[in-house]
Image: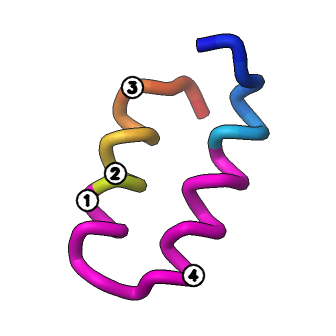
Amino acid sequence: MALSTSGVHEASHAAVVRAPWPSGQVFERAVRGTMPA
């Protein structure tokens, strides 16, 4: 990915906050699993 790790983390976090549904949590976990903390 061309995006920075912090940018991806912020984007995923914002998505989860704006859309509080199971899919959002799954997406966040997937991002955390594939991208370094």
**Residue type at tag 4:** Val
- In the image, taking residue 34 as reference, residue 9 lies left or right, namely right
Q: Is residue 20 magenta?
A: yes
Quarter of the image where the C terminus is located? top right
Tag 1, which secondary structure? helix
The mark found on residue 29 in the picture is 2
According to the image, label 4 marks what residue?
Answer: 17
Tell me the CA gap for discs 3 and 1. Answer: 12 Å
The mark found on residue 34 in the picture is 3
For the point 55% across and 25% down, the residue is 36
Tell me the CA gap for discs 2 and 3. Answer: 9 Å
**Residue type at tag 3:** Thr
Tag 3, which secondary structure? helix
Q: Upstream in the sequence, badge 3 or badge 1? A: 1
Q: Is residue 14 above or below residue 34?
A: below
- Magenta-tinted stretch: 9-26
Tell me the CA gap for discs 2 and 1. Answer: 5 Å
Q: Upstream in the sequence, badge 2 or badge 3? A: 2
